[in-house]
Amino acid sequence: MVSSRYSTYLQEKEQGNICKHIEYTQSDRKSYGNIIPSEVKSLGYKCFKYCSSLTTINIPSSINELGSWCFRECSSLKSINIPSSISELGNGCFNGCTSLKSINIPSPISEIGEDCFYLCPSLTSINIPSSITSFGDGCFYGCGCEKELMKNKRIPRDCFNKW
């Protein structure tokens, strides 16, 4: 399926054309802001990367994909709502989110990508639903709840290793 950037979607909409898979990109975010429009279906690669002003975000249920490194080093991000429409947390999705305190992973998610919660020292509360069958290397390295997660035998040891 071909994705259209949000800015392209707005141009196409003016001309009466229809776009079905709309991706919010980093350049879209810089142009239109941190509120994710309801028409958007996915958050693109590095969409919110280095967005230090972001403290909380509500992801609409229209979103079905979080791109790799989507929220990388959003150093002020404390909380995030992940809707059940998401099935996978991409590589490095929350890497370096040093203020992130807790996260609720919905049951439809089956995969946590490499380095997903890498170096999230404030993250002390995370649920790991039984639906998760794939854990990427280093996904919990330097995570505030690393010791607690190590007690979970379903989580491979490679999840706690630095690359």
Image: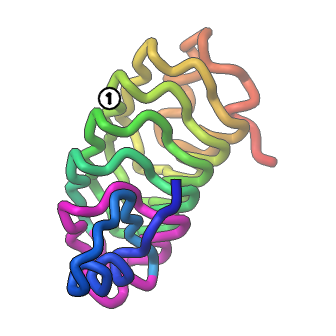
- In the image, residue 148 sits, relative to residue 10, either above or below, namely above
Within the image, what quadrant is residue 24 found in?
bottom left
> Which residue is painted at 45% across and 52% down in the image?
66
Q: In which quarter of the image is residue 25?
A: bottom left
Task: Identify which residue is drawn at 52% across, 53% down.
Answer: 1
Classify residue 41 as left or right of residue 25: left
Near mark 1 (Cα within 10 A), the count class, few <14, some 14-19 or many ≥20, is some
Q: Nearer the viewer, residue 5 or 37?
A: 5
Reading the image, the residue beneath label 1 is: 106
User: x and y percent of residue 5 in the render?
Assistant: 42, 74
- Can the viewer see residue 29? no
Magenta-drawn segment: 27-54
Nearest the viewer among 34 and 138 is 34
Q: Is the magenta stretch mostly helix, strand or loop?
A: loop
The residue nearer to you, when weighing 11 against 81, is 11
Residue 38 is covered by the magenta coloring: yes
Q: Residue 71 at what x, y percent from top left?
A: 45, 62
Q: Which of the 4 quarters of the picture holds residue 154? A: top right
